[in-house]
Image (cartoon, helix red, strand yellow):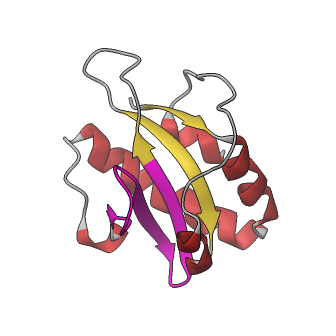
């Protein structure tokens, strides 16, 4: 199961979503995790792609105007991808896709726990 860390900006952004938006994101992350476990070839519907003018930052589409930015981090458990969640919100987060500020430690929960 992939590991993750959620940067403080992501957590703040997540708290601002409506319950319906969080529910939609939950469903999308379940598919995202499935695809990570299967080798990281993401299904077309997730619209995972690199954010332009960045290095190693990707976006995940979870609603028509819902995006989350993330990157791969240093592997914590051998053979298991580690995801760093940066931002979540509307398409406008792509203007500033990176979370500012220091990381707040490395959590060892599963990626799906970030939204539960």
The answer to if 3 sits in the magenta stretch is no
Identify which residue is drawn at 25% across, 21% down. Answer: 79
Is 1 situated left or right of 10 in this image? left
Residue 102 coordinates in the image, percent (x, y): 67, 33
Residue toward you, 108 or 31: 108
- Quadrant of the image containing the N terminus: top left
**50 or 111, which is in the foreground?**
50
Asked where in the image residue 44 lies, by quadrant, the reply is bottom left
Q: Please identify the residue farthest to the bottom as the structure is shown.
A: 64
Q: Quadrant of residue 92?
A: bottom right
Q: Position of residue 48 (x, y in %)?
A: 33, 64
- Where residue 11 sits in the image (x, y, percent)? 72, 48
Q: Which residue lies at the image location 31% right of the left edge and 25% below the top edge?
A: 80
Up/down of 98 relative to 7, above or below: below
Image coordinates of residue 113 in percent, x first then y, are 60, 37
Is residue 67 in the magenta section?
A: yes
Task: Say which quadrant the C terminus sits in.
Answer: top right
Is residue 72 found left or right of 104 in the rendered image?
left
Q: Which residues are magenta?
A: 49-70
Q: Measured along the vertical axis of the image, is residue 25 above or below residue 5?
A: below
Q: Is residue 73 above or below residue 76?
A: below
Q: Residue at x 67, y 71 (%)?
A: 21
Front residue of 81 and 86: 86
* Residue 51 shown left or right of residue 38 in the figure: right
**Residue located farthest toward the front when viewing the structure as drawn:** 53
Q: Residue at x 67, y 63 (%)?
A: 22
For residue 13, above or below residue 72: below
Counting labels gives 0
């Amino acid at each position: 199961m992939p590991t993750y860390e959620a940067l403080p900006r992501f957590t703040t952004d997540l708290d601002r979503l409506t319950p319906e938006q969080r529910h939609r994101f939950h469903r999308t992350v379940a598919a995202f995790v499935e695809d990570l476990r299967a080798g990281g070839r993401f299904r077309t519907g997730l619209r995972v792609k690199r954010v332009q003018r960045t290095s190693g930052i990707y976006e995940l589409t979870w609603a028509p105007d819902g995006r989350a930015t993330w990157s791969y981090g240093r592997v914590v458990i051998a053979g298991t991808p580690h995801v760093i969640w940066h931002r979540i919100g509307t398409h406008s987060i792509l203007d500033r896709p990176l979370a500012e500020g220091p990381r707040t430690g490395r959590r060892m929960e599963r990626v799906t726990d970030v939204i539960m």
